Amino acid sequence: MISKSLALKVLNEGLSTGADFAEIYIEETNTNTIEMDNGEVKTINSGISFGAGIRLLKGLQSVYGYTNDVSLKGLKKLAHTLAASYTGEPILTVSRIEKVRVKKHHQPKIPLSDVSKEEKIALMKEANDACSSYDSRIVRTRVTLLDNTKKVTIFNSNGKEFHDERSRGRIAILAVASENGVIETSYVGPGAQKGLEFFKDDIDVKALAVETAKTALTMLHAEECPSGKMTVVIGNGFGGVIFHEACGHGLEATSVSKELSIFSNKLGQKIASDIVNAVDDGTIEGGWGSGNIDDEGIPTHRTVLIENGILKNYLIDSFNGRRMHMEGNGATRRESYQFEPTSRMSNTFLLPGKETPEEIIAETEYGLYAKSLGGGSVNPTTGDFNFAVTEGYLIEHGKVTRPVKGATLIGNGADILMKIDRIGNDLERAQGMCGSASGSIPVDVGQPTIRVQDITVGGRGGKQ
């Protein structure tokens, strides 16, 4: 990386025209990816990304730039260019930098970077074979295994230096089923800040592959979903994406601080039904979205967002916290050095209740069981959303009956929180990538099974 003496010169160059804060973020990322299509390895890629970003703040103004040239000349040139955005005399200088000890959690026992390609391919083959051999109607399988190790160094004008290392691994399994011209797909993508032990001990790749195949086959015979207002039971795990998108982004200071969120200025107010409790927890050991520190060097937190329906906290980065007169709480993240950091979720989920999923369904006379959700769109200012249901079933007389396809959930984030009337005891988290202002980052979404009253369901199966 770079020395303290070099960092001091660059920071002071950035502060030379009156900025009140300067920061250097340096990153080296090693990435490995193997892709297998129908049991054959198609691509094996490895890459290294290296560079630095400099951020200067002055009041409520921010300027950011990045470079691959981390020499003194290259970094001072960037700092000088950014400093030209402001005019004035320096109001502070940095004379000393102190290294801050970062506690090392989330350490792989068997780093994937140390595992041979042959052993990785053998693991992928297990998943592929379990999926493809399950039924002759599985006509295509795709398995991807990726791992990356990111080494980060941060220097700032508070005289602090931070070092962190983050290693993640993920397997993605896609099954394609076909019969009589109908094609359906199913996908899973578990991951963690762990090594080979995650794939050997924590998950069963064969069982996941079989379940993926089963889902694709089930949806081959699904009817078109009816439409209208109905009770919807949303499954655990990736069902939590509806909270992440429709509500979670609205709790990030990026939008809250500018009053562009439906949840702005609502701390201490009731925003959900009494049974709703939600957290963002970046401290979960080995969690896909966890961290030792955030991208400002602040230790990650377990932040209670909603408690018994009351809004308790936002996710805050230091810059947007200035507008809010609040301190950053370990929620500052970015995709890479090429992105200016801002407030983002880490592992965000609803806490469990006491009912079983079976009890919730048994108490539902008619509705939709959205076992798994896919992509969608959300307007963070209004909270309006729509999500595709990738695996759905009708609930009739308290029982899950026919599979349905083409269902879309349409509603509003603030509204849906108030309409949650049942929460299960089966909390599960699932992994994904979240795109927003500071790029695409790994996050966990999650929830137990929940029931929501009166969601608008879109579908081509006629009115219910």
Image (spheres, rainbow, N blue to C red):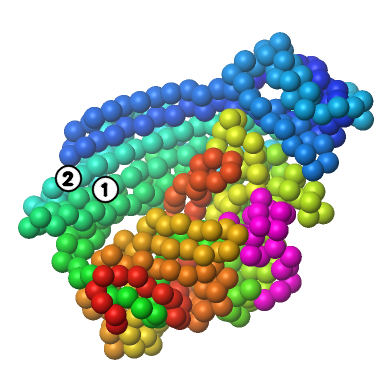
* Residue, disc 2: 140
Which residue occupies the foreground of this view, 106 or 10?
Answer: 10
Q: Residue at x 63, y 76 (%)?
A: 308
Q: Nearer the N terminus, badge 2 or badge 1?
A: 2
Determine the image quadrant of residue 180. bottom left
Q: Give the range drawn in magenta.
A: 249-270
Q: Where is residue 110 in the image (x, y as percent from the top left)?
A: 44, 36
Task: Tell me the number on the disc at residue 277.
Answer: none
* Residue kind at label 2, given as amino acid type: Arg
Q: Which amino acid does label 1 sit on?
A: Leu
Distance (Cα) linking label 2 and label 1? 8 Å
Query: Badge 2 local density, few (<14 within 10 Å), some, or many (20+)?
Result: some
Q: Say whether residue 102 is left or right of residue 464.
A: right
Q: 257 or 74: which is nearer to us?
A: 257
Residue at 52%, 73% (x, y): give it. 416
**Can you say whether 177 is above or below 226 in the image?**
above
Residue 54 or 106: which is nearer the viewer? 54
The quarter of the rendered structure image containing the N terminus is top right
Position of the C terminus by quadrant: bottom left
Image side of residue 296 versus residue 229, left or right: right
Q: Judge left or right: residue 70 versus residue 450.
A: right
- Residue 25 percent location from the top left of the image: 67, 29
Q: Is residue 48 visible?
A: yes
Q: Is mark 2 on a helix, strand or loop?
A: strand
Residue 276, visible in the rendered structure:
no
Secondary structure of the residue carrying tag 1 is strand
**Residue topped by disc 1:** 174
Q: Circles 2 and 1: CB distance less than 8 Å? A: yes
